[in-house]
Image: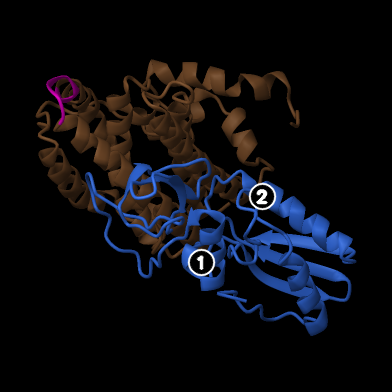
Amino acid sequence: MSGEQEALVEYLLRLGDDRLVLGHRNSEWCGHGPVLEEDIALANISLDLLGQATLFLRLAGRLEGQGRDEDALAYWRDENRFTNLQILELPRGDFGFTILRQFLFDAWSFHHLEALARSGHSELAGLAAKAHKETRYHLRHSSEWVVRLGDGTEESHRRIQTSLDELWPWTGEFFWQNEVDAGLRAAGVAPDPETLRAPWESMVGELLGRATLAIPSGPMRMTGGRMGRHTEHLGHMLAEMQIVARSHPGAKW
Amino acid sequence: MNGMNSVNGQRSTVNGTDRALEILQGVMDPEVPVLSVVELGVVRGIVVTGDAVTVTITPTYTGCPAMQVIEEDIRAALAAGGFREVTITTVYAPAWTTDWMSSAAREKLRAYGIAPPHVVGHAPPVPLGPTVRRVECPYCGSSNTTTASEFGATACKSLHVCHACRQPFEHFKAF
């Protein structure tokens, strides 16, 4: 595999892992939503994210050429091989925490996928354009709730502000980069992550302002998700997600 | 066929293609059984060589669980129609859009009680924060409706309520 091909596989794993992990976290709401409509909404969003993860991981496996399909990548890699952003693996918290995290991710993903839809790698561009359409819809939904809860009752405001205080320091990782990004940017395959910062900050800043929420000013968290370093939460989540596949290898249902 | 790509570079038997198309027009979306997979815009190309057929499809939503059923239904229908070799290939670009749905297909949805999608055209900017969307009621035609949920029983639908005829209804999302 050439260096560029290796970088692309790594990049596709990131795209897939972000969506697999967030999709799984959101799916934990199934049967526990605050109202039936939101239960269905979160299940639908999870389904889209898992569908996107399938496409990105499948392509990663194919380009890697070692016979691993999307299921092998999802179920048979250990925690330190997952390259998702740490913010996405945090426990789901209350509904406000989940929907605010979804909004912060959607706003980043919206700009990220938009840039990737112009990628010089046509297959990646096609998948990104498709995922972008779904992200638009998610963004509309998550942004609605952030305003409704932030500019809502005293309690909803207080709780979602607390969630913002908790989540904000993790958002720095959206713009983390290493030689994988640099190589793919030089090859015209992926954008410089830094170019996503201004549009993300502007979209998020405007919406949080409307939601009467204050952006915390403290320091950002440590990063490392892209390198396989995770919080204590991911291992627990994966244990649950992977147990059936690992207990019954090759099972079909 | 509305919005279908032309398939180049392979010899195709015209009569065979017509026959395959006719068969696929009888394969219904398992979730919305008034629309065929052709009307839905999922079938993007048909190439027939002798008694072998290759059908190119594209998924509606990436995670739509009905896609597997649709694939199996297409395979079974073509096999029953006399094609000995059925190959299905999946493409993701251009991304599926409800704009490929013909006006006749939209009318079928309305008659079935599902408000059809409006034309999206070029992707408009995303309205952030709470918005009011008034989808026309498929039963009485009133626009005095509210959105009950942006997400419905399937990935492709949202839920609404009509205040004129007091009927809840589904809307096939414009996507």
Tell me where residue B83 appears, x and y as whole percent: 87, 66
In-image side of A241 versus A26 (left or right): right
Q: According to the colouring, which chain is brown?
A: A
Q: Is residue B117 magenta?
A: no
> What type is the residue that disc 1 sits on?
Pro
Instruction: Give the CA distance from mark 1 to mark 2.
Output: 23 Å
What SS does tag 1 mark?
loop
Q: Which residues are magenta?
A: A152-157
- Which three-letter amino acid code belongs to the residue tagged 2? Pro
Q: Position of residue A112 (x, y in %)?
A: 33, 51
Kindly indicate the quadrant of the structure image that contains residue B63. top right
Q: Quadrant of the C terminus of chain A?
A: top right
**Disc on res. B94:** 1
Which disc, if any, is residue A76? none
At label 2, counting other C-alpha atoms closer than 10 Å, the crowd grade (few under 14, some 14-19, many 20 or more) is some
Left or right of B131: which side holds B61?
A: right
Q: Is residue B64 left or right of residue A40?
A: right
| Residue under the image location 37 percent in, 33 percent down | A85
Chain of residue at mark 1: B
Q: Which residue is mark 2?
A: B30
Q: Is residue B93 depicted above or below A19 in this figure?
A: below
In terms of depth relative to the viewer, which is nearer, A13 or B17?
Answer: B17
* Label 1 vs 2, first from the N-terminus: 2
**In the image, what residue occupies the spot 82% across and 78% down?**
B16
Chain identifier, blue in the render: B
Which residue lies most toward the front here?
B165
A119 and A93: which one is in front? A93
- Mark 2 chain: B
Relative depth, front residue between B163 and B26: B163
Q: Residue at x 16, y 19 (%)?
A: A155
